[in-house]
Structure formats: C-alpha cells, structure tokens
Image (cartoon, helix red, strand yellow):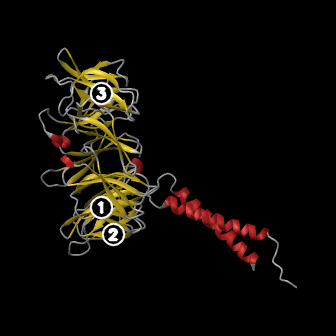
Amino acid sequence: MRRVISHFAILFGCLTLLIVGMLAYARRDAPPDWIIFSINQRYNNDFDIYRVLSDGTHTKRFAFTSDEHPSMSRLSNDSTGWLMLYDRYRGQERLRFLHLLGYQEVMNYESSVSSMLHYDRESQIIYLTITDDWLNNRTLWVWDLKKGYHLPYELPFKLGELRAWLDGEGLILWSDHASAGDLYSVSFTNPPKVKRLTTHGKVLIDPISTASEGWLYYLVGDGDPDPYNHLYRIRTDGTDEELVAEQVLNPVNAIFFGSGDPTIIYYWAEANENPHLVQARPDGTEAVDLPIPVIYGWGRGWSSDYQWMYYSESSPDMVGPQFLGGNLRRINMKTGESQMVWELSNLQQMVWSADRTWLILLTTDQQSGYSSLYKTRPDGSDVTLLADNLRGMYLEIMVGVKAVAYTTWGEVGKELHILDLQTLEIRPLHDDAPPGRMRQLLTTLPMPESDSQAGWLVGLGAILVGAGVASTLLPPFRPRT
C-alpha cells in the first residue's frame, strides 16, 4: 500500500512540475496583463468591477462601485495585485485599496484628492497624501495593510513639486518652506524622515530634466531683475553640490528635456541676444551651442536614435497645460530642422510601435468628444485611421509597452479592444468578457499572482516527489511477530 501511495505522490508531483513549467514557458515572452473595467448591467447607479486577462479569458467580478466615474490606479509597477480606487459613496468621497482576489481595505471617507507615493510590497505599507488643500498640505499618511492601521505624519514643510524618486526608499520634493524654495528628501521609513538638501533659499520650482544618474539638477535665482539663473546639480543624498552653468534661461512654457543619454545634458542660454539650446557634459564642460531656438510646448518623447525630439507646440503667452493638445512637431537635435508631424491641435497621446517604425496617435474631437486612433510614420507621412468612435481620451499602456487597451461604442454599449504594438492588429476583448449596458476601462495591471502561486505549486510538486522517492528508499514496513 505504501508503495502505491509513493508512486502516486511521485506521479502527481511530476505532473504538477510539468504543468507549472508548461505555463511558465507559454507566457515567457508576453505574460498577460489584467485589464480592469467596470460594467453597469442594471438601470441604477451601481457598477460592477471586473478583471479579465488580456487574452480575453478568466473574467471575474471582484468589486463594485456606485460612482459612475471612479478613478483607479495600481499601487506600483510590480505584480502586487493591489489597486487604489477613489470613488463616491452616498455622496461622500472614499478611498479603497482593492485586491484582485476580492478583498479590500476601506481607508478614508473624507478626502477629496489622494495620491499614492510609494508601496512597500514586503511590509505591505502604503505612503500617500490625502488633502483638500494642495497649497498647504503637510501630511504624509502611512497605511499598514497587514496590521490594518493608518497614521498621519506632519512634515515640517508643505509637500511641493515632486522632483525625483529614490529607488523605492523615498522621494525628493521642492518646497518653499522657510525660503523662496529648496529641495528636501523624504525617506519611506516609519516614521518618515525629512532632510533638507539645499540651502540656497532661491531654488526655482521649475524642474530640470536630465538622464545623468545619481544627480539632481535645479535652477537657482540670483535675485537680480534680469532673467538669468544658475544651474546646479547635487547628488540625491545631498552631497557634492556643483555649479554647472551660469546665466541659464528659464523661459515660461519652454521645454526642459533630458537627452536619453546619461553623458549629455541640455539647457537654454543666450548669446548675442539669441536664445538657444546648449548641449554639454553632465558637469557643464564641453558646452556646445545648438541651432535650436527656444521651443514652447509639451515634450512628447524621442526617436529611437535620439536625433529627433517630438513635442506639441504652443505659443509663449499660453498659461498652464492648455497646449497639451497642440500640433505635433519634431526637431532635429543636430541640424535644428523642424518638421510638422500632425497638423491638428487635437492630439491627446502618442505611443511608439514595438519596432518604433510607427507612431500611434490618439486624437479627440473637442466638439463631439469622440476620439480616433491613427498610425503614421515618424515624419508624419502615410497616415492611416486605425479606429474611430472611441470614448475616452487616453490609452491604457500595458507592461512592456507591447499593447494598449481602449474602449469604443458597440451594439450593446462600450466594448473593450486591444491594439498590439508589435503587429498593429486590433482585436476585441469579448471571448470571456460579460456584456453590459456601459463599460469603462479603468486600468491595466501586471499578472499579479503568478509568482506566488507558481512558487507554491513548485514547492508542492517538489514535496510530493521528494516524499515519494524517500518512501520508496526506506525499508519496507514489517509487523511485529
């Protein structure tokens, strides 16, 4: 009897390891994402929230909301399975943390705006802000999902503009506490720790983007009436502050952008009353004047060789982010040549195809509110309509930027679709997704349970095989005589 049980243990253990191995091999290149969406299947204000894999299978309802327009985001980019849902319940705002397995934590009923700053997966602690007043917010909340408590920590300064993340250990903020502006670091400990990095008192709120790793770049005003500033850099731990360049310009609504190359930085300067772009080494040496005038607008990204920078143009007198939908242009960083890529001020989003030979453009008609999806070559030629009659002004980009998800109107309501960024093929997500009167795409999430579940199954298979083999090697059981 023991021999039979041992053989069964070995058999089932081997089958478990085989199945886990086959599943891991099947999704080795393109592990599926969870797509999170809501459906209103009733004629009231309740919306069911579903999860479905991007291949259209394994659909499951795991939450609901009475808010017609909930706001949902994932806690972090890794596979945690947690989502942050901000909605209204009986006329009050609330913040909920939902897990794809169906359990949730209701955290707050009083906030009007919340922002997740960090999620510590190992300790299951969330650091976030909840505020009704962005201009005077000094509270950092620490939520412990394991122990079920939350505590507010009053910081000695107002939470200002986010400048940098510190590899999951904290962040660097600009704040005007006790000065016209300085940089502070906040470490994600319990309680959080605050450190003042700069002491100039005149650090400008406007950020400087750069790809130079381990350094933070910022502008410091000199107090004079002229428009010039000084460009500094400092290590993220607050050491080795250096002056990079003097008399740097900071034009309103101008684009400050990183190069994508950690050995190059860019900044605006002026020579002979000619404002232009300067290219230099990260420490400010080997500065070269480029034939590029000041660009006003919103940066959209780089070409694969970093020779062309794409941006939505605006005029210098525009205020705020009103130019987000401006005409799409690109400029050559060596020659200064400027090209129009999309000559309509309705662009909402730009995404590259997997091989970066096509641009995917999401545009919106301001009068009708409907959106369209186009593909075009990087220079704006060969424009092709991929889909129209879309609802929503954004694409949900999946992990690895291999596909995007969106919604459009169909025969029964909103329908979910996926655009493959490798083949540029569109397919509806209808195989296992339930029909509904209205659908709203909320977010996408990496495969959340694969690592832990696969680990448990591998461990179980190894235990079964080990127990079976060990049992066959032991001497047979003999009753006493």
- Amino acid type, mark 2: Ala
Mark carried by residue 63: 2
Q: At which x and y percent is residue 29? A: 50, 51
Dots 1, 2 in contact, CB < 8 A = yes
Nearer the observer, disc 1 or disc 3?
1
Name the residue furthest right. Answer: 481
- Image quadrant for the C terminus? bottom right
Q: From this view, report whether residue 5 is shown above or below residue 470.
A: below
Q: At which x and y percent is residue 300? A: 28, 39
Which callout, 2 or 3, points at the residue further toward the start of the chain?
2
Q: At which x and y percent is residue 87? A: 24, 63
C-alpha span from label 1 to label 3: 42 Å
Other-residue count near label 1 (Cα within 10 Å), few / some / many at <14 / 14–19 / ≥20:
many
Q: Which residue is mark 3?
A: 332
Q: Which image quadrant is residue 46 in?
A: bottom left
Q: At which x and y percent is residue 356? A: 38, 40
Q: Which residue is mark 1?
A: 85
